[in-house]
Amino acid sequence: MLSAKVSAALNKQIELEAASSQYYLSMASWGETQGLNGVSTFLYEHADEERMHMLKLIKFVNERGGHGIVPSLKQPPVTFKSVKAVFEEILKHEIMVTNEINNLVETTLKEKDYTTHNFLQWYVSEQIEEEALARQIVDKLKLIGDDKSGLYFFDRDLESMAAKTKGQMDKAKGQR
Ligand code: FEO
């Protein structure tokens, strides 16, 4: 059974994962209007992944006798300055998410909730990967700078990265 504190903290995380999904979905839609098919495919996948993070939490809360609450969300930004600005925002956002996961882990320790602590280890590892990926993409975009053909190849690269992410997500779904 979840304590009130852990339950509230998990529901806060559900909201954050839902907001992340909406945010990346908006970035994906913007990318599509800019003709950036690889970027948008990658971001649509990323939005789906965040939704999966949210679902995993809802199901866990419910399994442990709590109630996973589906939150209302604020509208995310709809336009973005550039592809580089998008991925810089993602990196910043993921660093914030990592901090929130760490706070959540700390709450479970204070509450002596070792089951939830164990469950959250998946999120701890996931955040390491997500931050590393965002950093890697931002570095690539810094190298490309204003080079249009560089951006073209970058967009193609992201398309194949999205296919890989989808494969990992399908695997994670299978493990649920
Ligand atoms: Fe679910 Fe990107 O954190």
Image (tube, grey):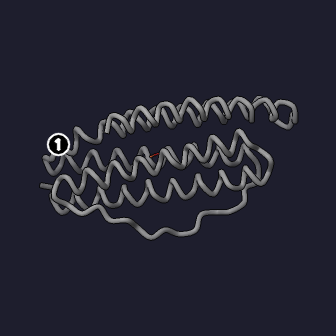
Q: Quadrant of residue 154?
A: top right
Q: Is mark 1 within 8 Å of ligand 1?
A: no
Say which of 13 and 176 sits in front. 176
- Residue 122: x and y in percent read 33, 36
The type of residue carrying mark 1 is Thr
Residue sitting nearer the eye, 170 or 63: 170
Residue 97 in percent (x, y) is at: 45, 48
> Is residue 132 shown left or right of residue 56?
right
For label 1, count other residues whose C-alpha is less than 10 Å away and answer few (under 14), some (14-19) or many (20+): few
20 relative position to 126: left or right: right
Q: Position of residue 161 (x, y in %)?
A: 62, 30
Q: Nearer the viewer, residue 99 or 38?
A: 38
Q: Residue at x 23, y 57 (%)?
A: 62
The N terminus is located in which quarter? bottom left
Query: Residue placed at 76% from the left, 49% from the top?
Result: 82
Across and down, in percent, residue 140 comes to 70, 30
Q: Is residue 115 above or below residue 25?
A: above
Residue located beneath label 1 in the image? 115
Residue at point 39%, 52% (across, down) = 54
In this orientation, which residue lies closer to the viewer: 84 or 42? 42
Q: Say above or below: 89 vs 161.
A: below
Which residue is at a point 22% across and 38% down the rendered structure image?
A: 118
Kindly state the secondary structure of the residue where label 1 is placed: helix
* Relative side of 13 to 65, left or right: right
Q: How many marks?
A: 1
Where is the C terminus found, in terms of image quarters?
A: top left
